Image: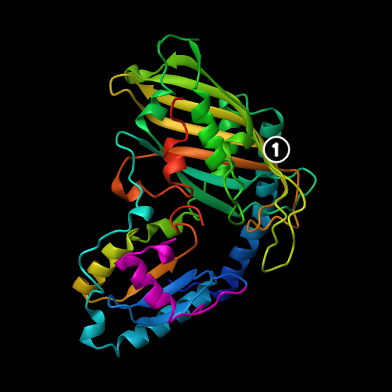
């Protein structure tokens, strides 16, 4: 199905327009839970889920990273494929 | 870290890095962070330090184009046997537990538009002995106990560190105070599991180091601290004497900056949160904690 460009633009604009109040509500819920000292299970879940990475934020985990460089070298040689290396001061799969 | 390893793996990385975007650089720092496309023999095909998707796809395109021209010698592995540098080898503790840590700025009541998308991760390795500190001695509703303080201090020193926007150093044991973590057996769940709640506090503070950020030239003139409440929701399986859920939350205020955590313009106090969740003990999850090393491994050992 071919989607006209104008439809797509409207959909994106709508999602931005809708997301602002939702974000504000979410932020308010987190602030209230923190202010209340996170006493209930509901408050705990509100703050805990806010901090954890969302599905979108976790998309980079869907790449089958090889955490061991030496193992990556061996696999690259065996499969005759180039290596894509992500090197950071910390562990890229952990704290960078 | 890998750049300092005195073994074949370190040599490989130094070889490609010294062909790359930061080759030979020592000022403002000697970091070699970035993305590299290379052959198994250590020939660099392309590199860049970027988080911009368009630049990454450009890097991949250049790398793949260069790959078409490599000769078979360059595809051969740099080495086969690895005599790993023991100074950088950290073993996961047998019978231990892995938690994934996520840290993030919390919303600010006085700044409606404050962005909270920045976050960072770390991994916690708890030894079997440290896990045992969370296990109740009696499984009956309202049974209360305290988690050993040295275990809480380990979490505070190495994991209640503000690294949302960049790196910071851990706290020394002497800089940690108010570490209390009380546990309460709440109720029995289906399947003979038990729900346990945690309540506690921890605070850490270091005086201004006077260090200067080499990029901005800004100097650390104020103390760096966190003052946190701790809450937990755990599910304990008495049969396997293990936890099937281990949700831990620390929240409160952070203040000050470290040399590289990019807080010079946001000194606080401002709200921050740390969330910890259980990961299955599988090889792919055994990501080394940021501050893993001898001090980390022995931090909570009984005196």
Q: Residue furthest bottom?
A: B69
Is residue B133 shown left or right of residue B25? left
Q: Chain of mark 1?
A: A
Q: Is residue B31 above or below residue A53?
A: below
**Element marked by disc 1:** helix
Q: Nearer the viewer, residue B199 or A2?
A: B199
Question: Which residue is disc 1 drawn over?
Answer: A31
Q: Is residue B73 above or below residue B95?
A: below
Residue B292 sits inside the magenta stretch: no
Residue B12 sits inside the magenta stretch: yes
Residue B124 lies in quadrant: top left
User: Which residues fall within the magenta stretch?
Assistant: B1-27
Residue A51 drawn at (x, y percent): 57, 44
Q: Is residue B119 above or below residue B183?
A: below
Is residue B111 shown left or right of residue B65? right
Residue B21 drawn at (x, y percent): 50, 79
User: Which residue appears at 62% of the width and 47% of the height?
Assistant: B162
Residue B231 drawn at (x, y percent): 57, 28
Q: Nearer the viewer, residue B140 or A11?
A: B140
Residue B192 seen in render: yes
User: Which residue appears at 38% of the width and 55% of the height?
Assistant: B88
Viewport quadrant of the N terminus of chain A: bottom left
User: Which residue appears at 59% of the width and 63% of the height?
Assistant: A11
Q: Is residue A73 above or below residue A26?
A: below
Q: Residue furthest right?
A: B110
Is residue B203 shown left or right of residue B302? right
């Amino acid at each position: 199905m071919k989607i006209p460009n104008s439809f797509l633009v409207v959909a994106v604009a709508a999602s931005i327009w809708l997301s602002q109040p939702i974000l504000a509500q979410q932020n308010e819920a987190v602030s209230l839970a923190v202010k209340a000292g996170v006493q209930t299970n509901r408050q705990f879940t509100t703050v805990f889920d806010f901090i954890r990475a969302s599905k979108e934020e976790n998309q980079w985990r869907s790449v089958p990273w090889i955490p061991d460089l030496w193992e990556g070298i061996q696999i690259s040689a065996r499969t005759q494929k180039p290596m894509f290396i992500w090197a950071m001061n910390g562990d890229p799969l952990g704290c960078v | 870290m890998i750049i300092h390893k005195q073994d074949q793996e370190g040599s490989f990385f130094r070889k490609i890095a010294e062909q790359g975007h930061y080759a030979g650089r020592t000022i403002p720092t000697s970091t070699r962070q970035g993305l590299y496309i290379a052959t198994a023999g250590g020939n660099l095909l392309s590199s860049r330090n970027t988080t911009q998707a368009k630049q990454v796809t450009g890097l991949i395109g250049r790398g793949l184009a260069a790959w078409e021209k490599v000769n078979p010698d360059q595809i051969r592995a740099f080495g086969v046997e690895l005599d790993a540098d023991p100074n950088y080898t950290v073993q996961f503790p047998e019978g231990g537990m892995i938690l994934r840590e996520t840290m993030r700025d919390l919303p600010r009541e006085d700044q409606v538009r404050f962005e909270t998308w920045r976050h960072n991760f770390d991994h916690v390795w708890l030894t079997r002995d440290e896990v045992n500190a969370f296990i109740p001695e009696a499984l009956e509703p309202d049974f209360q106990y305290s988690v050993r303080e040295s275990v809480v201090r380990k979490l505070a020193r190495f994991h209640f560190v503000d690294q949302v926007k960049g790196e910071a150093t851990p706290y020394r044991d002497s800089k940690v105070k108010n570490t209390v973590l009380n546990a309460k057996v709440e109720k029995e769940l289906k399947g003979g599991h038990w729900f346990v709640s945690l309540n506690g506090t921890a605070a850490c503070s270091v005086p201004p180091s006077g260090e200067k950020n080499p990029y901005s030239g800004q100097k650390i003139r104020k103390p760096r601290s966190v003052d946190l409440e701790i809450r937990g929701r755990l599910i304990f399986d008495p049969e396997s004497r293990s936890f099937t859920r281990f949700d831990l939350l620390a929240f409160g205020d952070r203040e000050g900056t470290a040399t590289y955590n990019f807080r010079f313009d946001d000194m606080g106090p401002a709200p921050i949160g740390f969330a910890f969740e259980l990961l299955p003990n599988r090889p792919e999850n055994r990501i080394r904690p940021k501050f893993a090393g001898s001090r980390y491994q022995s931090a909570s050992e009984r005196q």
